[in-house]
Amino acid sequence: MVKQIKKMIELISFRTFLIIVLLLTALLQFTLMLDNVRGITYDIQLTELAPETIRSAKTVEDVAKTEFDKETAERLIDPIYVLNEEVANHRSTFVTTIFDIVLEVKEEIEKEDKLPPAAEQITLLRKSLKDIIENQSSFSISEAQLANLLNASIADITSTRDTLSKLVEESLARPIRKDQLISFRNEFESKIRQQYAIPEPLMSLAVVIGRAAIVETEILDDERTEVAKQQAREAVEPTRILQGQIIVQEGEVITREVYRQLELLSMLDNKTSVKPIIGLVILILLQMSFLYILFERSQQDLSKKRNALLVTVIVYSIAIVMMKLISLIAINFELVMAFVYPSAMATMLVRLLANERAASVVTIMTAASAGIIFQEGYATVLQMDAALYILFGGFASLFFMRSVEKRSHILQSVAVVTVMNVLFIAFYLLMAQSGYGLKEVSFYIAAGVISGLLSGALTMGLLPYFESAFGILSTMRLIELSNPNHPLLRKVLTETPGTYHHSVMVANLAEAASEAIGADGLLARVGCYYHDVGKTRRPLFFIENQMGTNPHDSLPPESSAKIIIAHTTDGAELLRKHKMPQEIIDICLQHHGTSLLKFFLFKAKEEGKELDENVFRYPGPKPQTKEAAIISVADSVEAAVRSMQNPSAEKIQKLVQSIIQDRVQDDQFDECDISLKELKIIEDVLCETLNGTFHSRIEYPK
């Protein structure tokens, strides 16, 4: 079943595979986190009793209440009136002007030799007063009043003028608004009628002129009033329903106002807001986009990219599931249970199983998801303490896991993560300024320690399962395989000690050369330990294990070639039987490529046999990686130099050059991405290492 799935995966392109995996991961994440963004809702109706004490799950502005408060504040602003102090003077002048005109007309009439008829006098006076009468609204003087004016003496007119003018000026010195005019005019009329200086014939006229002279002295300032109202509106603070605020107590009636607030907070089943759900979708799309870019641009081998992708999303999914479980448990506790989560687990696993870049992305993604999953009922958008906790813990482990060559290095990282967790919790407690007692503080410190220890324990516990399931050859796995107590290495050591020694020497050469060109030196070393494990099937047919007689002397060359060639396939079979990583098996099969066994080919020709050259060639495949190519050269070089009489630096260099050139001319490196420049570096490193191994020694005296 597993093999069939792998074959199906290999049939589709990596981009298609990447999209499918990320979509499935996004779907799982969305399902697990949906409840965290949807919030608490209630199926309640108006006039029902509240099933429990309901608190606001978030802070929102109550727009309707805010607008009501603003309108109330606006209504409370009194209109702003402006007192026009010049009105009194103007209206006093108005009164004086009327009587002055009358005096002028009387003077003109009296100058004439013959007095005109009364009707003409009245007409002349009305004509003189026409402009001033027309400019005043609701102001008219009757014929009788005009006649009384003309008949009155100059002294009476002057007395009436002065008295009325003074009354008007005094009265208009006080503020009078438009709505007060009628009552004030009535009051003013009473004052006029009480004035003895105004003769009775002119009293009615004085009343008419006096009432007309009284106008509003305070005028409504619309602009300033509007500004004051706007300022009053702006001074009203928005009414907010705060997180944690009690909306209704358990057992209380759901009033229309309570129902409206619950509706505003989207805490009713029929009013759930889709905005947080859309926000969650956007967050997941961003996270999956980072993973897409990361793996789409990766230059790794296709098989390794697939494994790294699967490991990354599975570890990330495990992290989310763990956070979800802890968040469900946290409901029963008043303390922040997020601090128990193993903050560096996902980072450490992805770092060991994939690469550092993927681990960095997963750290950020896990922190962002934790902020939502661990979101308590009254947090804003993210539970920042949980997000930062995982962020600091994850990156702390990442920085201190640059070199992972021993399990103790993981333990050192765990110690660093634990210290970082405790320091962050100290920061949290100090910034929160909460009155936690010794019991609560002890819990939080213990949570930080448990989180760090769990990070290491889960990493080391899950690591073998991932390595086995995906055939991933991590640094830790390579270190385990390099242990001489491994069953296969013990088999090589006990059954083929010469081969074992040869493998160790080749390992030294291959590791140095690999590190010089940036290849995986540890993989090259461990690959060398196992590359000749197939020789354990027929150990005496290989010269380094022979103690006297050479069995090939009695065999035809084609049979000898078959036995020698078979050690690569025999080794691969043995490695598969012990469930060894594919990279080690590939090195075993590829370290001779399709090279030619020249010794037995020449022997066959000397015996007069005409055989196909392919009979004396290894089945391959040719080296596919730089490590396999280096081991192929180092294997031949070590064996050749060991058989050399009195090796010198010049002899070793010529031999190494000839072996590399032979491999190049035989097209053995056509299927791996090794360059001529790198081959030159490999040549120099091999020569330097061999010179140090096969140096001349002092001959001790007998």
Image: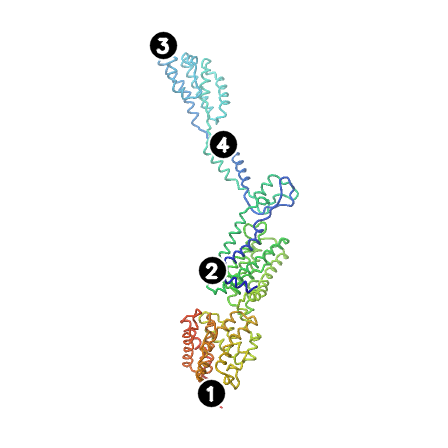
- What kind of residue is marked 2? Glu
Residue 266 x %, y %: 57, 45
- What is the CA distance from the residue labelled 3 to the residue labelled 4? 55 Å
- Residue displayed at 45% across by 18% down: 208
Pick whichever of labels 3 and 4 is earlier in the sequence.
Answer: 4
Q: Which residue is mark 4?
A: 79
In the image, 129 versus 420, the foreground residue is 420
Neighbourhood count class around disc 4 (C-alpha, 10 Å): few under 14, some 14–19, many 20 upward: some
Contact? badges 1 and 4 (CB < 8 Å)? no
From the image, state whether disc 3 or disc 4 is nearer to you: 4
Q: How is the image coloured?
A: rainbow
Query: In terms of image quadrants, where is residue 28?
Result: bottom right
Q: Which residue is mark 2?
A: 296
Kindly tell me whether residue 415 is visible in this rendering: no
Q: Secondary structure at mark 3?
A: loop
Pick whichever of labels 3 and 2 is earlier in the sequence.
Answer: 3
From the image, state whether disc 3 or disc 2 is nearer to you: 2
Q: Secondary structure at mark 2?
A: helix
Looking at this view, name the residue that lies furthest to the right: 251
- Residue displayed at 52% across by 36% down: 71
From the image, state whether disc 4 or disc 2 is nearer to you: 2
- What kind of residue is marked 4? Pro
- What kind of residue is marked 3? Pro
Neighbourhood count class around disc 2 (C-alpha, 10 Å): few under 14, some 14–19, many 20 upward: some
Pick whichever of labels 3 and 1 is earlier in the sequence.
Answer: 3
Q: Which residue is mark 1?
A: 699
Neighbourhood count class around disc 1 (C-alpha, 10 Å): few under 14, some 14–19, many 20 upward: few
Q: Which residue is mark 3?
A: 116
Position of 521 compared to 334: left or right?
Answer: left
- What kind of residue is marked 1? Glu
In the image, 59 versus 644, the foreground residue is 644
